[in-house]
Image (tube, rainbow, N blue to C red):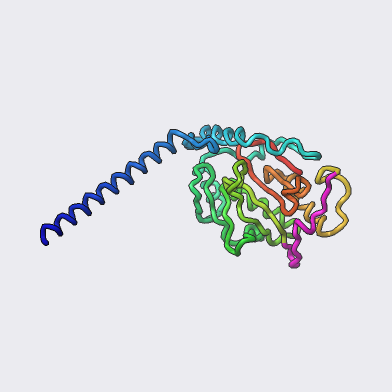
């Protein structure tokens, strides 16, 4: 009986050592693959982003992989603004700039080496950003987070107190959502409690540029277009897409930030 007990313990110990060795080998292979190879759908992962030059190379690879997704829509507007371009920089520099601005939003990492996520706790410059899925705080990438205060101040000029944001479309292969750098906005609530629902209240303008021509007939539609035009004119966001863009955007605005890209887009 004693001999059998000792043998069982020995087998258990050897099995534990074997498991530890297998796990260590798997972890080593995973780390090596992540450092040396990158999947076809994320070639920028081959770059360890430590310097601004690294970041510029990595984001250039993102832009090349994504291609010019927006070009070719009727009545679209492109503007170039190097000074307002969101910088391509290492995460540590972006997070330091966020801290220097007094934004102590907690980290909510999603294992993205290029765009650290932060959780937006409480209103930003008087504007609450709320998830449409649940009442908890939204999470965005650092380069978008650092622009939220200016974005919020522009929203306040139109009387906006709350923004209802949809869940991030992280499944999208070629989208800045995957970096936490895009928001899909479904509704805006004004100071008096009026909720402007993009799907119901936005007035389509398929025959002209979004900010050109006469104002929309309805007051709700007027405010929604005013918001879109304010954000684009300020170049606070790289992309402002309205329901004018296509059928897939009939029920929301799409706002995004593209680091290292000097182009600004509106439709």
Residue 117 percent across, percent down from the top left: 53, 50
In the rendered image, the quadrant that contains the C terminus is top right
In front: 114, or 11? 11
In the image, is 196 to the left or to the right of 18?
right
Quarter of the N terminus within the rendering: bottom left
Q: Is residue 166 above or below residue 44?
A: below
Q: Residue furthest bottom?
A: 193
The front one of 139 and 232 is 139
Q: Judge whether residue 130 can be spotted in this image.
A: no
Q: Is residue 49 above or below residue 105?
A: above
In this view of the protein, which residue sits in the foreground, 112 or 257? 112
Residue at 75% across / 59% down in the picture? Answer: 197
Q: Is residue 31 visible?
A: yes
Taking the spot 33% from the left edge, 46% from the top edge, the residue there is 23
| Image quadrant where residue 265 sits | top right
The region drawn magenta spans: 189-206
Give the residue at x 39% y 37%: 32
**Residue 78 on image: x %, y %:** 74, 37
For this orientation, the residue located farthest to the left is 2
**Where does residue 129 sit, x and y in percent of width and height?**
64, 59
Q: Nearer the viewer, residue 57 or 236?
A: 57
Residue at image location 78% in from the left, 55% down from the top: 224
Q: Quadrant of residue 126?
A: bottom right
Residue 191 included in the magenta stretch of the image: yes
Q: How many marks?
A: 0
- In reply to whether residue 41 is colored magenta, the answer given is no
Residue 173, picture quadrant: top right
Q: Position of residue 41 (x, y in %)?
A: 55, 38
């Amino acid at each position: 009986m004693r001999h059998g007990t000792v043998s069982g313990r020995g087998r258990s110990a050897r099995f534990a050592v074997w498991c530890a060795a297998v796990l260590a080998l798997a972890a080593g292979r995973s780390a090596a693959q992540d450092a040396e190879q990158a999947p076809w759908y994320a070639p920028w992962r081959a770059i360890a982003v430590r310097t601004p030059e690294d970041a510029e190379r990595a984001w250039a690879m993102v832009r090349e992989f994504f291609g010019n997704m927006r070009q070719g829509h009727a009545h679209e507007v492109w503007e170039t603004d190097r000074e307002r371009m969101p910088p391509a920089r290492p995460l540590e520099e972006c997070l330091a700039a966020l801290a220097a601005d007094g934004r102590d939003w907690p980290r909510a990492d999603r294992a993205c080496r290029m765009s650290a996520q932060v959780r937006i706790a409480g209103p930003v410059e008087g504007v609450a950003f709320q998830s449409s899925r649940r009442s908890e705080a939204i999470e965005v990438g650092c380069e978008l987070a650092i622009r939220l205060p200016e974005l919020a101040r522009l929203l306040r000029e139109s009387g906006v107190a709350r923004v209802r944001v949809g869940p991030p479309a992280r499944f999208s292969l070629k989208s800045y959502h995957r970096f936490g750098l895009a928001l899909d906005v479904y509704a805006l609530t004004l100071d008096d409690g009026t909720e402007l629902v993009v799907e119901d209240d936005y007035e389509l303008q398929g025959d002209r540029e979004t900010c050109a021509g006469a104002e929309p007939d309805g007051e709700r539609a007027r405010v929604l277009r005013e918001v879109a035009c304010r954000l684009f004119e300020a170049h606070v966001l790289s992309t402002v897409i309205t329901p004018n863009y296509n059928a897939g955007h009939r029920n929301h605005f799409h706002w995004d930030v593209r680091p290292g890209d000097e182009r600004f887009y509106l439709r």
